[in-house]
Image: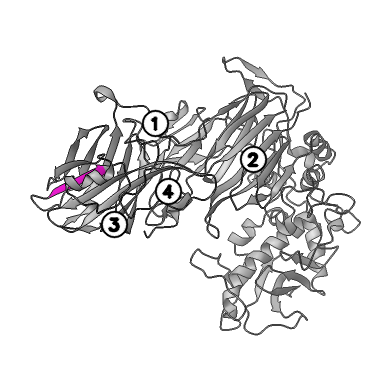
Amino acid sequence: MKRKTILKVTTIGLALALLGCGSSATSQTGNFSNGPTSLTNLDGNARQLRISVPPGGGSVTLPRTQNLTGTLTFGPGAAPDIVLTLTVTETAPPGTEPDTLTGAVQRDGFYYILWDTNKPFDFALVQSIALTEVGPEGTVKPRVIADDAELYQAELSEYSQGNATFAQAVQGRYDNDTGGSIYSQPDSLVMQPGTNYLFQAKSIQTEVIPVTVVNNSGVEPAYFCVLGQNPNAVREGKPDPDYYRVSADGKMVPFDGNDRSIGNTTDPNGKVDGYTELYNIPIPNGTTQFNLPQMSAGRMYISLGRKMQIRLEDDRPQSPPLPPPQPPVRLAQPNGWTNPGDPNYLTLFDWLEFDYKVNGDTNLPGIGINKTEVDMMGFGVQFTLQGPTIGSRTVGTTDDGRQKILDDINADNFFKKLIVPGPAKGKKENGTEFDLPADIPLRAIAPVKGLENSQFNRPDPPFKGFDLTYFDQYLTHVWTRYKSEDLKCYTSAFGIWYGRVDANDKMVFTCVEADGTPRAGFEHIYVRKPSTTNAFEPTELITSGGITYQPDPPGGPFLPVPQPGPADQVPHDGDDPKLFTKFAAGEIVSALSAAMNRTTLLHEPLITRDYRNHPHDLKLFYKKDAGTPRINVYAKAIHDHSLTTPDAPGSPNSNGGGAAYAFGFDDNSNQSSFLSELSSPTGLKIVITRLKL
């Protein structure tokens, strides 16, 4: 049977329990038709229902048949006197084979509904199919689906003589009110009399990663809060707009505005903002285990002493407008660096970022995960990822790294201002409030966040500012050097580019052959001299038109280099040279940003993403000398007290320390703590290192 790739392992969960079937049945021989007599080939489990479709729209309650009840809701527009015949069975009709199992998938079962009609009928008029399993005396059973799925998915196929031809996927969701599932918004498909259509839903427990969390911090209570989005397309390839949390039993649960119970405010349009503490999973001292379901744009917040307060905002019009569909409730991430009014500001917290979803190359689930210090460093976390290709690899802060990082930052007169002092606030489960020791700082914020506070003239304290001119003299020396020397940039796949500062104080990058000879047809890329703020984070340089090019004719106006879009094809050698501009510019900016943060530009004339073929001298990272007296102390301190990897080996082979994500492009030369396993990861372990109490 023809299937969409997303139906293999990407579903979060599919509905079986509506019919209470605990395992899949094997296909039977013979024809599967609309007549009740032929259903004996299906173990006698089939039930037949006849539905008169209301032309003006409305709901039709399905009479109870054995353990199934429900409602069909129709939109207006059906022809008069349409009768649908539904045959419901828990046994697989001939020719319907299950999706290929990959990874640690457990099959829980299937159910099937065969549709027939006496007149042409557009399936899109079925606005929803609500199905609920019922127990003795009509009572609704509690959730009996083995994986307690929050999302369901069904296939609609044209069915004939044991062959099912895929027509469309129909998405569903768990219904908290009924304990069943609701399928909605099918695409248009005109059913014809005499043709059977098979609606089949499968309950497959999606691969999960077993996660072990070890709380060695010495602080109790501690909490885990996992937030993100569904990585699977929901309709016509469109992403699911909703936000989800992970429950203590490892299930994705959609955000609900009714969860807000703290600090609710309502604007004149009736839109509500507010906070909830319901999304926290308690972590006692020692070891806690749970399952991580597939999730995209995920964050794992860890808080010590009290729960995270998660801000839920009613959907508001976006500028520029976002394409539909839109979520009913949006997530506003906690802010511990530029908003002392955030209720989490005095909470000791940190987080990891991850994507766990099906890898398009292998159709296997894969994960990428990272501990980020791009915004702040709260406390030490180590994490170990396991899988068939990665084996077992551990990265993160060293056991005593938090205190050493803070000591190194505090020893520098510029960077010490970025430390947010304690005491952190705590709150026990019984409501008793307490303070952690006052000599335990809350966090160190990244210099780019201190620069933001200074740019907006936010008072210090409570805002932690940073010197807006910190790198100005260094950048002047860099620009002076490359007026008479080429800065070589080796991209990963978009050519070699040499940069030279011109008379207008712009660094002009030219695509060249391996011997440095300019390549014909490629456009020049111009980079304005960065400010201190741009050196730490180049976003403003890009958005303000600091990265430009001159399209044909030569000498035409300077235009901002556009960012590559989803529809852009990645160029290859032999393609139109002008296709390379936006891709090459992105890599030039990322490599230049990494070099400015690591202050290597006066030590070697090299920036690169192709570090395997054109490696940096790691001993030059964060190196101080007379020409480079100022470095990114925040980044160096974090790297110095992080676990090493082959690409970030630490002293004596590197002055860049171990692997960490201390600024936005720290993945250049593979110096970040990012780990990935794209072939069914088997385990994740997270260790919260001990605080100095």
Q: Nearer the viewer, mark 3 or mark 2?
A: 3
Query: Which residue is identified by label 1?
Result: 144
Query: Which residue is identified by label 4?
Result: 240
Q: Give the Cα distance between marks 3 and 1.
A: 30 Å
Q: Nearer the viewer, mark 4 or mark 3?
A: 3
Query: Which residue is identified by label 3?
Result: 162
The magenta-colored residue range is 83-88
Q: Secondary structure at mark 4?
A: loop
Secondary structure mainly formed by the magenta segment: strand
State which tag comes first along the sequence, 3 or 2: 3
Which amino acid type is shown beneath numbered disc 4? Asp
> Taking 181 as reference, is 192 left or right?
left
Q: Give the Cα distance between marks 1 and 2.
A: 28 Å
State which tag comes first along the sequence, 4 or 3: 3
Query: Which residue is identified by label 2?
Result: 684
- The percent coordinates of residue 283 (x first, y second) are 62, 26
- The percent coordinates of residue 249 (x first, y second) are 51, 31
Pointer 4 with pointer 3, Cβ within 8 A: no
Q: Secondary structure at mark 1?
A: loop
